[in-house]
Amino acid sequence: MEDPLKQLPEIFNNGRMKNITFKEEHRQKVLQKTRDLNRPPAPKSWLYHWFHQSMSLALGVAFIFIFIQFAQSTPSNVKQKEAEQMVKIPYANQAILTKARHDMRNHHDVTGVDAYQRGDTLSVHIIFPDNLTREEQINLTKSYLKEVSHLTLNEPYEAQEYLGELWNYVNVKVYTAGETGDDLLAERLQVDFSYDWLGSIDKKEGILKWEQLSDKHPYTGTGNIH
Amino acid sequence: MIRSSKEQELFSQGLSQEEWLIQIMELYEDKVIRLAYTYVKDRKLAEDLAQEVFVKCFVHKDNFRSESSVKTWVYAITVNICKDYLRSGWKKYIHVIDRLGKSKQSSALTPELTIVQKSEHEALADEVLKLPLKYREVILLFYYKELTVSEISQILHKKEPTIRTLLQRGREMLRRKLEKGR
């Protein structure tokens, strides 16, 4: 028996495929498509050029702006930061310390006050006459710190903004000037007692907190200076 | 390799690109559109895909390698385009809509009546077109397009023993279906 599949060309071509033919319109469509492929691209309109150039310019400007912003926000190196701090800290404190020293010497019984700042530590050296009791000396030291605090907090706007950078630690050394015949100041000074104070500035509350850290002769005077 | 005189003319003469395209269309237009139909089973689609085949032939004319015949080359492009279409998501969408439409139409004619009305030849053509794609394409290329196993293996990029196996299985599947239909 003959394989019916061998009749497939006849079956299809005379049956359902009879009317499936490639017509002239299909041929023309193919030719048109191939012509379109070979055609050079149409010149762009002036609107396209204008839009393209505007977009390029806008993107360029935006890129430069972002680059500048980024460059500005990049943290400077440590040395540069330290140098800026060194410039900023002494300036803010020098006037305060001078004023405080002036007030202490004029209104209180203090022989000499010397204060300086290195980094974030404020060192204070106070010389009292030897007739003052230790309690009076501590009270006067507190008064000095209060004075410095008030002046610090009354600093103008810019200084207020950088309060935290002024100083963090206060180191106080108290000396007593003895009544000896020797004129040399160094020999007259006796380190009566020395204690360290930790001072910090709370920017939010606007207060300066301080705390006595060490004392060769223990003293428990801690508190806030408003 | 044996080539027909017309095929030889295609690549031997100094034809312009457009003349070459017209000649290749004259040679294969009906064969291509009918082969495309066996894949997509839709006349309009087959027309569109056949156009795409000739555009692709034109674009890839320089890629034609003389170790195969022009016919094999054109059929391979046709098969690839049809399979690409069948794989595409768009086809799946159309297919669902098409099936919905057909399910409404089929209610008018009972399956029994449909079978009676069909001649044996039509039934055979129907069953061939209903075969799964991997068997259908091999059966059609072998019996309908009358290509050799070697040519089919070139077109489908499959080994000759694989083509023979697919042919064998396709024939068996078809025989079972036709017997069941009787």
Image (cartoon, coloured by chain):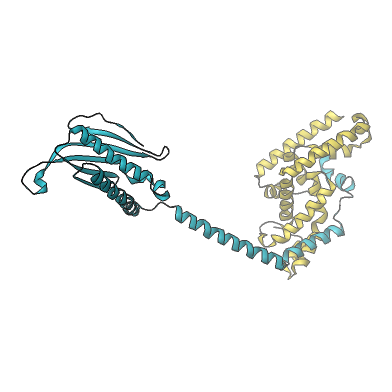
Chain colours: A cyan, B yellow
Q: Residue A161: percent from the left, percent from the top? A: 42, 47
Can the viewer see residue B141? yes
Which image quadrant: the N terminus of chain A? top right
- Residue furthest to the front: A107
* Residue B53 vs residue A132, the one in the foreground: A132
Q: Residue A212 lies in what quarter of the image?
A: top left
Q: Residue at x 66, y 42 (%)?
A: B161
- Please tell me whether residue B122 is drawn above or below residue B146 in the rendered image: above
* Residue A115 vs residue A198, the one in the foreground: A115
Q: Residue A109 lies in what quarter of the image?
A: top left
Which image quadrant: the C terminus of chain A? top left
Q: Residue at x 29, y 40 (%)?
A: A145
Q: Residue A111: percent from the left, percent from the top? A: 18, 44
> Left or right: where does residue A151 sit relative to residue B179?
left
> Left or right: where does residue B31 sit relative to residue B117?
left
- Please tell me whether residue A69 is drawn above or below residue A48 in the rendered image: above
Can the viewer see residue A40? no
- Please tell me whether residue A57 is drawn above or below residue B137 in the rendered image: below
- Residue furthest to the left: A181
> Left or right: where does residue A111 sit relative to residue B87?
left
Q: Residue B181: percent from the left, percent from the top? A: 86, 30
- Residue furthest to the bottom: B14
* Residue B75 vs residue A179, the one in the foreground: A179
Q: Residue B56: percent from the left, percent from the top? A: 72, 57
